[in-house]
Amino acid sequence: MAVPFRKISKTRGRKRRTHYTIEASTTVKCPKCGEMIKPHRVCPNCGTYKNKEVIKTEE
């Protein structure tokens, strides 16, 4: 069974993980109502997707 010859230091392990960061989710503006939404999804505010009404909403 393979066993490490030496212990990997905390610094060396943390250097390897420097790119493991949380990114903010991308949002775009709804072309109809201007609400910020996730891309490629139906707007929860006005119920449109690609300028077509998908969900009927009470306005």
Image: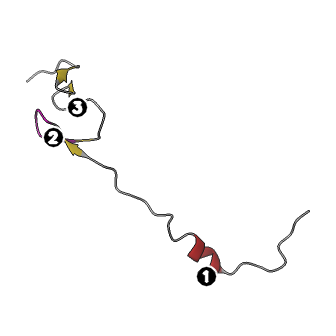
Mark toward the start of the polypeptide (2 vs 3): 2
Q: From this viewpoint, which residue is outermost toward the right?
A: 1
Among the two numbered marks 2 and 1 on one chain, the one whose residue lies closer to the N terminus: 1
Q: Which residue is mark 2?
A: 35
Classify residue 3 as left or right of residue 14: right
**Picture quadrant where residue 1 is located:** bottom right
Q: Secondary structure at mark 2?
A: loop
x and y percentages locating residue 24 in the rendered image:
34, 56
First along the sequence among labels 1 and 3:
1
Residue visible at 17% across and 37% down? 30
Disc ID at residue 31 = none
**Badge 2 amino acid:** Glu
In magenta, the rendered stretch is 31-36
Q: Please report the residue visible at 58 percent of the width from the left and 75 percent of the height from the top.
A: 14
Residue type at mark 1: give it. Answer: Thr
Q: Is residue 20 left or right of residue 7?
A: left
Q: Are marks 2 and 3 in contact (CB under 8 Å)?
A: yes
Magenta part mainly helix, strand or loop? loop
Quadrant of residue 9 in the image? bottom right
For the residues bearing labels 2 and 1, Cβ distance under 8 angstroms = no
Q: How many marks overall? A: 3
In screen coordinates, is 25 left or right of 19?
A: left
Q: Which residue is mark 3?
A: 44
